């Protein structure tokens, strides 16, 4: 059997020991660089360190289920995800695809079919990355955002943790979502209407009071000096923005 041309980083998330062993044996023989996880919580930590180029994901996981893992992964990673699941209901498949899965393969399956799906997913990912770089000059999502050095603002998207001045800051879900949208667009002004739609939903696009209130809350928690904000900045009459991340 042919091996891959390069050591593609692949994360296999499967709680069944026999299936996990089978997949790892087959994939190792085909030249992949592998990491494995038994549950979703463990997989999040591994994904943040390993930065996989493709993910194989079972949905029935302990600790953190596959759909929750997928939703959290998509906050900071665009790696293609192929779901490998015994669930055959259309509702589950649609939910997984809506959350960002690239493909869905129902168990049982042949290794040859899996390899074909992996090749297609990798080709699409490479084409998307080339297009993104040509249009924006950016290489894609990162697992962290840092501004202001070691004692500045740090967002760890994988762990959903935020630090300011070296101390962890506890945010509400809405505060965290708002901060993430701004951080993902760092260096660009995000219009108020777009922020409201992404964080609260399309029915809230005129609720500017919501936005001002939560920006004020975030500044109180994150800014060393709220009268001279460094991280949460506004473009008068347009929207809000954050500074570009520190160079790595």
Image (cartoon, rainbow, N blue to C red):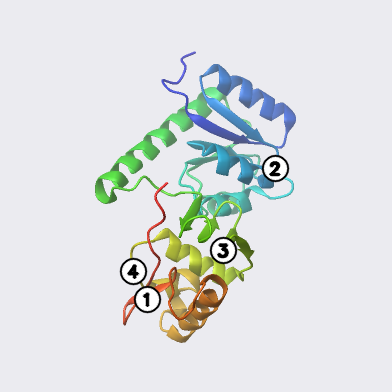
Q: CA distance from mark 1 to mark 2?
A: 41 Å
Q: Position of residue 123 (x, y in %)?
A: 37, 34
Mark positioned earlier in the residue sequence (1 or 2)? 2
Q: Nearer the viewer, residue 99 or 234?
A: 234
Q: Nearer the viewer, residue 87 or 52?
A: 52
Q: Quadrant of residue 47?
A: top right
Q: Position of residue 227 (x, y in %)?
A: 45, 81
Left or right: 125 with respect to 84?
left
Mark positioned earlier in the residue sequence (4 or 2)? 2
State the residue position of label 1: 234
Q: Secondary structure at mark 3?
A: loop
**In the image, residue 105 above or below residue 214:** above
State the residue position of label 2: 39
- Residue in the picture at 44% in, 61% down: 183
Q: Position of residue 198 (x, y in %)?
A: 45, 69
Left or right: 17 with respect to 204?
right
Q: CA distance from mark 1 to mark 3?
A: 22 Å
Q: Which mark is residue 165?
A: 3
State the residue position of label 4: 189
- Residue in the picture at 39% in, 61% down: 186
Q: Nearer the viewer, residue 55 or 175?
A: 175
Mark 1: give few (<14), some (14-19) or many (20+) Cα within 10 Å.
some
Mark positioned earlier in the residue sequence (3 or 4)? 3
Mark positioned earlier in the residue sequence (1 or 3)? 3
Say which of marks 3 and 4 sits in front. 3
Q: CA distance from mark 4 to mark 2?
A: 38 Å
Q: Secondary structure at mark 4?
A: loop
Say which of marks 1 and 4 sits in front. 1
Mark 2: give few (<14), some (14-19) or many (20+) Cα within 10 Å.
many
């Amino acid at each position: 059997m042919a091996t891959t041309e390069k050591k593609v980083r692949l994360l296999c998330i499967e709680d069944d020991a026999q299936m996990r062993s089978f997949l790892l044996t087959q994939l190792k023989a085909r030249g992949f660089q592998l990491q494995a996880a038994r549950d979703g919580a463990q997989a999040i930590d591994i994904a943040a360190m390993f930065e996989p180029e493709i993910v194989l994901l079972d949905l029935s996981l302990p600790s953190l289920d596959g759909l929750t893992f997928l939703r959290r992964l998509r906050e900071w990673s665009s790696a293609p995800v192929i779901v490998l699941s015994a669930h055959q209901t259309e509702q589950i498949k649609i939910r997984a695809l809506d959350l960002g899965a690239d493909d869905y393969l129902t168990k049982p399956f042949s290794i040859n079919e899996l390899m074909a799906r992996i090749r297609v997913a990798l080709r699409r990912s490479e084409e998307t990355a080339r297009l993104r770089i040509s249009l924006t000059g950016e290489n894609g999502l990162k697992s962290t955002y840092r501004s202001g050095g070691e004692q500045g603002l740090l967002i760890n998207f994988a762990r959903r943790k935020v630090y300011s001045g070296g101390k962890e800051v506890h945010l509400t879900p809405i505060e965290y979502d708002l901060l993430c949208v701004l951080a993902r667009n760092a260096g660009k002004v995000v219009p108020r209407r777009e922020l409201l739609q992404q964080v609260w939903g399309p029915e809230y696009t005129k609720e500017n009071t919501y936005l001002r209130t939560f920006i004020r809350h975030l500044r109180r928690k994150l800014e060393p000096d709220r009268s001279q904000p460094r991280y949460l900045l506004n473009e008068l009459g347009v929207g809000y923005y954050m500074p570009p991340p520190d160079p790595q």
